[in-house]
Image (tube, coloured by chain):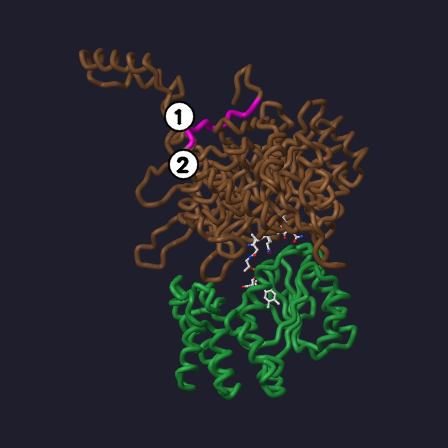
Amino acid sequence: MQSKHHTYRTPLHVNPVDRFDQKTVRSIHHASMMLLSETGIKCAGIRAADAYRQGGCSVTREGEGKNTLWRVRFQEKQLMKMLKEVPPKIILGARNPSNRLILDSQTPAVYFGTGSESNIYLRSAMDRFVSSGKAKREMNYPVFTEETGSISALCESAHLTEHLSHADFFLRNVNIQDDFITSKNKDIHVFYSALLHTSKHVQSGLTDPDALHRVIRLAEIIGGSQKYLPISFIVCPMKSPMQMVADSSEKLIVIAKERIPLVISSSPQGGSTAPIQEEGMLAQINAEILAGIALAQCISSGTPVLYGSVPVRSRLDNLHDCYGAPEFIHYAMGCAQMARFYGIPCYASAGVSDAKRPGLQAIMEKVYSYIQVASSGAQYIHYALGLLDGTNMFSPLQAVIDNASIGLVKHILREPICSQQSIDAAVDEIKKTTARSGIFAKGIRTQIRKHIVCDTYEFISDSGEEDPVFTQAHYKLDQYLAAQRLGLPKEVMQAVCEEFPELSGTHIYE
Amino acid sequence: MSKTDCLDALEHVIVMGHLDADDEGFDGMMEGTPGALELTRTAIEEEIDPQNILKTFNRAMEIVGKKFESGEYLLPDMLASAECVGDAMEILEPLLTEGTGSEGKGKFLIATVKGDLHDIGKNIVITMLKGAGYKVIDLGIDVPADEILEGIKKYQPDFVGLSALLTTTMIEMEHVVKKIREAGFDGITICIGGAPTSEEFAKKIGANLHCKDAMDAIEKIKTVRRNIS
Ligand code: B12
């Protein structure tokens, strides 16, 4: 993927599409500042409240006993000072250094990766169906089995991600529910499963703050002597509207102290925990994310953070979360602009479908959001591969299909490579060809070699009867799954097993 | 305003989900006009029989329910109406003779279990239960089993509702159910809900009902009440 000078994965560079003009961006900023200075946030964590106080925020105690909360208010000037400390550029490490990612808040260059902690793993196999009509037509179609999320499913997903050319990072996508998993041992098993099977950047939430140092140690052993750890974290400290949760604020604090890259996210649901109209959603989510980022800076000024935007819309019939709605895209685009306004790399959400099985609805909902959210220039798009039924299910087959869609989207959105020189060359080509054969086929060759001509969709039809996407994608999936697992060099494996004896029963990771 | 006009107006504002004069109502055009709270007070001042006011609430919610079923109303519409009834009940409650108010319909104690902070679903269930005329005691989120047990002793509910959205906290429900039963509260109907829970899980942990959403809860609880009475 890279030349000698490149030590990062190649992102998709876009010409960012702004949904709002700068005046509106400033108005939303002011609305958030007003919320933060007047209403402030309710903070349930005592250590977080102390840190805010030391950082110069106004902190007042409310309630008694179990219901004690601290009201934290922020003045714009002082908040902006804290935000200035956020590094505008972040490098996320990877086992394979050429898989590192560079996120620069001022450069609209986009990476795509997995996400969610889905409870269900959707396995699939191709089957042959015969129509019940007279004609007895035959066709191939997948059949599916829902399986409870497990270590083995997480390992398989990490292995698959290693092979998906457009998956730039692996954010743990499966909720491991094996019998022996507890909140105490979950983190080490999640990170190990992922790091063992992919050389791409690995990210996850932290279930137990006490596990942090062991997870870091594991990443150091597996990452070797690299400057950048192959892992980062995501924390969702905010409970919308405008509350900071005690246990997640503790996680944020311990991670920020280590200065490990950290996504600070908020996930309000438009219509249930935030206004459904985008200006309301943006004013609120922006205030919530900034309050979280401010805490990280109070703890350790200069801690690398991502502006974690996961705005969702509610379904109108039951207020459950819903992702196929156009507002899901509007919200995400707005957040990307807000993050750019503050100079903080943006963690965005796209590629989620409400469909429960792979297919047309899933592809349609996903592709629109890839195109729009990527074109907004958000640097790090999570949720992008394999998710179905909102964020509740991961389908390897869908992930392969999504990979192909993202490939196409990358071509659609790539910046034009057009200069006076190339225009002159084109005129020359037209003149010459017109004088000769009149067929421009020869010119294709140079344009292909310059990577200017785009690929077509990966799964193509050669007979009219049957849609070939499932068959071809499944064939590819089966090949990926059959490929040799990445594993670890022997000496590294030994070092891991010495320090982490609980990981030595390797059979569960296969 | 005649008594009938007053009750018709009350029924109308509940159907429109118009809480009070500050509230915009169904389509953003109702601000400044009396809502369910004002009209309930007016009805009381007019000395309308509290039982008739209660019947109006029920009639209005029946209309809302039908509109929801037919697809004319969305859940937010129904929640707005349920909120009107829930809040208006607080005004009416002291005037109702024992056994005819919400306590008569049933007391429902509800909590999100320990370790879990999710409460959107729980709060929807609460609004709908109140709208359907139940007395609801909400213990909040992240509630340890012992606190739920204390709540049961204090409030003597007919139903206990438990909510969990995480696979890790859903296990806590089993613990809570066990404690409730061990303490001898066999007559309490325990309902569980939350995305990862299921009918089988409810059975496995000894809960009486699994409710997939708020509507399901209302329907299932209704049957239990019928069986009790
Ligand atoms: C909104 C949300 C949040 C919000 C919660 C806001 C709030 N006020 O509740 C925030 C951002 C705070 C949050 C935090 C977290 N979340 Co969350 N969250 C969700 C999300 C997207 C929607 C849940 C929701 O509100 N649904 C809408 C309501 C209306 O539906 P409902 O809750 O199911 O309730 C209905 C029925 O189930 C039923 N019901 C529910 N309870 C009860 C009770 C009774 C008695 C009855 C009768 C009926 C009933 O009736 C309700 C109304 O119809 C879900 C995804 C999902 N689809 O479930 C993830 C999800 C539950 N969260 C998840 C995770 C991982 C987390 C975090 C750990 C994230 C993190 N890394 O920090 C934290 C955990 C915090 C904690 N300790 O609890 C995962 C859980 C996976 C797992 N491990 O099991 C999910 C599934 C998302 C995912 N796929 O990754 N979350």
Residue matched to label 2? A21
Residue at left 52%, top 17%? A3
Residue A9 included in the magenta stretch of the image: yes
Decide which of A391, B50 is in the foreground and name it: B50
Main SS of residues in magenta: loop
The image quadrant of residue B95 is bottom right
Residue matched to label 1? A415
Q: Secondary structure at mark 2?
A: loop
Q: Which chain is green?
A: B
Q: Amino acid at mark 2?
A: Asp
Q: Amino acid at mark 1?
A: Glu
Task: Confirm or reject: label 2 Cβ below 8 Å from ligand 1.
Answer: no
The reply to whether the C-beta atoms of the residues labelled 1 and 2 are less than 8 Å apart is no
Q: Chain of mark 2?
A: A
The image quadrant of residue B121 is bottom right
Q: Chain of mark 1?
A: A
Decide which of A283, A312 is in the foreground and name it: A283
Q: Secondary structure at mark 1?
A: loop
Assign the C terminus of chain A to one quadrant of the image: top right
Q: Which residues are magenta?
A: A8-16
Q: Which chain is brown?
A: A
Q: Is residue A228 visible?
A: yes
Q: Quadrant of ligand 1?
A: bottom right
Residue at left 54%, top 70%? B128
In this view, the residue farthest toward the left is A435
Q: Position of residue A156 (x, y in %)?
A: 60, 40
Residue A169 included in the magenta stretch of the image: no
